[in-house]
Amino acid sequence: MSMITPSSRSRGPNKGGARRNDNNRIYANLLPVTFVEPPRSRIRSVLGLLGLSLTEVVNPHCEGTFDSTTRSVWVSNSKDTMLLWRRGFFGKGDLSRSEPSWLARQINNRQAGGKQMTSEEVTAKRRAERKQFKLDRAAAIAAVAAEAETIFETEGRVIKPALSGPAIPSAATWRPPPSLTVPPATPSPDEEEPTELEPLVDVEHLQLTLQEAFFLAWNLDCLTIFDPHTNDTMSLKQLWTACQIAHLPPTIPANPNPPLQFDNPFLINYVVYHHYRSLGWVVKGGIKFCVDYLLYKRGPVFTHAEFAMVVCPVYEDIEDQKASSLDLQNSSPFAWSWLSTINRVNSQVQKTLILVYVTIPARSRLSHDVLYSPACLKHYSVREVTLRRFIPARMRD
């Protein structure tokens, strides 16, 4: 049983009520599979007394294509794409930062006549302004220091350079130069405006990690995955084997059926993903914060992630690690400087760092054939260690 529980810290005043209500309506379902309650009736009441139910299970049956090169599953149908994102936040748009919104951004940009910036453009503009602010502030501080040095050489007076004041720009007083604010291009009167714009075609697809895809196909049975070469439906056994082979290093000459291993990175990461998804958490990639996974209580549109997970494989038999052809990340002891760096990065963004230790079963006590079925997952175990950064000035009480 997981010891991770959501924090109870205050979220501040209630802001954006209308937007929050829209999100509650749009993302009301936590999983693609939904349950529809029948209307109240006498038959329903009688069956309820007998412990029976007439609840209908609605399964969307989405479709995707397996891609071993990117180790992902592509969902191209726009309806399936939005359904998987809005019901559980599965995958990400390949042309977006998270939610597949490329088509909506293009439509809004066209309706605004090119005057409305996309979220990616806003981020790039903010980064350029932040960089310019630091350069201007550094130049102002250098000018004040040079002035103090000149006064000391000419008058012999010692003046301590001020790091704040009218001459030093701050975040409240600094304004971006006109060169960073690019006005939208306006067509000249001589230019002919196009009478009709070409219709937009949605070229974005939803990219599911193999862990997400197998969870949807095996646990929820709501995703059908096709082989990209034959266009045939992949069985659960074929998908399970293909996911493991995709994470193995290539061999020369190429071996279409390489031997499976107990320390396959797909197995280790899927154990963690399945563990926390089954406990109700929304699990997303955490490469932005130098970790393997992030845990959201409801989803990225509601709150920031509360926990950052670092997966640490542990061999039950140390001899298996010596004989393995795979060099798993974090399987060997890491430096305290690295751990302190990761912990500080996540502490600055209000996230608790969790080390997730996955125990890899020994080869000596299990048959190699168990790897060809998801039943082998029962031989893996998960342990958690919570790390908190100690700050003496804030933790005296």
Image (spheres, rainbow, N blue to C red):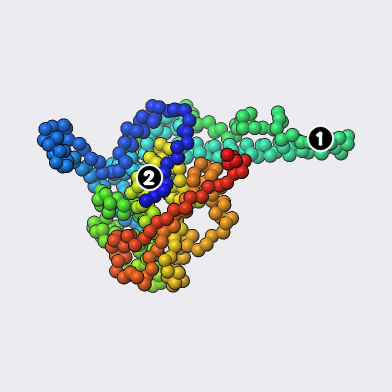
Q: Earlier in the sequence, mark 1 or mark 2?
A: 1
| Horizontal and vertical percent position of residue 138 | 68, 39
Q: Residue furthest front?
A: 397
Disc marking residue 282 = 2
Discs 1/2, front:
2
Quickly name the residue at label 1.
Answer: 159
| Horizontal and vertical percent position of residue 107 | 37, 34
* Left or right for 383, reference 87: right
Q: What residue appears at the point 47 percent right and 40 percent down from the top-left corner? A: 120
Tell me the amino acid under the disc marked 1. Ile
| Horizontal and vertical percent position of residue 151 | 84, 35
Q: In which quarter of the image is the C terminus?
A: top right
40, above or below 318, in the image: above
Q: Which residue lies furthest to the right in this view?
A: 155
Is residue 72 something that shows in the picture? no
Q: Nearer the viewer, residue 94 or 271?
A: 271
Mark 2 neighbour density, 10 Å: few (under 14) some (14–19) many (20 or more):
many
Given contact means CB atoms under 8 Å apart, are the residues at marks 1 and 2 in contact? no
